[in-house]
Amino acid sequence: MTAVEHAAAMGAPTDLERCPIMPTYGPPAVQFVRGEGSWLWDRDERRYLDLLSGLAVTSLGHAHPEVARALCDQAHRLLHVSNLFGTEHNGPVASTLDRLLGGGGQVFFANSGAEANECALKLARKFGGGAAGRFNVVSAYGSFHGRTLATLHATGQPAKHEAFQPLPEGFRHVAWCDLDALEAALDETVAAVLLEPVQGEGGVMPATSEYFQGVRRLCDERGVLFMVDEVQTGLGRCGRWFAHQHFDVVPDVVTMAKALGNGVPIGACWARADVAAAFEPGDHATTYGGQPLATAAARAVLSVMEAEDVPGRAMHAGDRFRTGLLPVPGVTAVRGFGLLLAVELDLDARAVAARLLTDGVIVNAVTPTALRLAPSLLISDDEIDLAVAAVAAAIEAVALAAEEGNPS
């Protein structure tokens, strides 16, 4: 693709010698200009059913009126002050998150999931004594924790590491859901274990109660922090407020982002109060973390989520998707919790995802054989039925094209 073509695809001026946007995502297939609920419209006013929610971000749907109103009101009042001062939304948002996690903790506000995980990693080192004591963090192969240098090394996908070596030291990886492998890795240098309750980018691979409870036991026995990355899974998406609550465990640290702002950048790291106390003023900071616009949005998001009982809605909607999709020819399994689902296929998921986009439905191929579904938690039954019918039609079209030897 030429520079001019790339600029046009990104919506940038086409009379430039080169596109001013770095090609970290590649040229987009569609340019969207507005959204409402579960639907998006492109610049040609074509409508798309969004089953991805910006990768599990717009969990209340696009342009939710209460979130939009909170943003508008706050923009007219106060956009930013230094974190040397308090603002009106930080305390209520932190208190709500603490309550949903069972209480007894404190919150640090960041701007993204990667930043929330960076906070957790620094907290683990400070709590463990750093290089003079415990500093290593153990995570699982197949995991995804971010793209900063530290969170990239915590991510258990070695292929993503190669271009950015040498990465920061202090990280090791073990097989997913293998308690023996984890136990073998927990020597006296380990400060924390960092796991997702469902590996989202790893293919929507859920943990089990036995595994998470075993991890909790090992961490208690070895004096190691159990840190849970709920960036994609948290805040109702998986049918509980936080997905680890399916497993009847209480972590020491929980990170979150994505759904918390419904599209407004905000992340948070919650830690048990005695763990959070390892931080002192000056140990960690971020200029924009917890700023008034983001926390106003988060406060509105959490209020709507509680009023709508989004965990219950996610469980109902997930069951409806599963019931509708499992009988579809070409679907071999549906896995996940609530509204974080992988639809396993017996054909090329990338071709099916491309066909669905052509048909006006947004999903992504999280593996070569699996589609990821992460729609709005407020998706309606009628929209679910439309989605199931669209997936079935796309699978049929791709399978027929493969039989005929034609591209889908």
Image: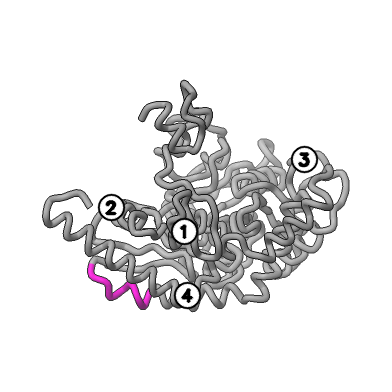
Q: Quadrant of residue 118?
A: top right
Q: Amino acid at mark 1?
A: Leu
Mark 1 against mark 3, which lies toward the viewer?
1
Q: Amino acid at mark 4?
A: Ala
How far is the residue under mark 1 from the one under mark 3?
36 Å
Q: Is residue 239 magenta?
A: no
Q: Label 3: which residue?
A: 283
Q: Earlier in the sequence, mark 4 or mark 2?
A: 4
How far is the residue under mark 1 from the one under mark 4?
14 Å
For residue 351, the mark is 2
Q: Label 4: which residue?
A: 317
Q: Amino acid at mark 3?
A: Asp
**For the residue labelled by badge 3, is the local secondary structure a helix, a strand or a loop?**
loop
Extreme residue toward the left, this view: 404
Q: Earlier in the sequence, mark 2 or mark 3?
A: 3
Between 49 and 123, the one lying in front of the other is 49
Q: Label 1: which residue?
A: 52
How far is the residue under mark 3 from the one under mark 4?
43 Å
Q: Earlier in the sequence, mark 1 or mark 4?
A: 1
Between 329 and 197, the one lying in front of the other is 329
User: Which stretch is magenta?
Assistant: 322-329
Q: Earlier in the sequence, mark 3 or mark 4?
A: 3
Q: Earlier in the sequence, mark 2 or mark 1?
A: 1
Between 269 and 56, the one lying in front of the other is 56
Q: Quadrant of residue 8?
A: top left
Q: State if disc 4 and disc 1 touch (CB < 8 Å).
A: no
Residue at 48% across / 61% down in the picture? 198
Q: Earlier in the sequence, mark 1 or mark 3?
A: 1
How far is the residue under mark 2 from the one under mark 3?
48 Å
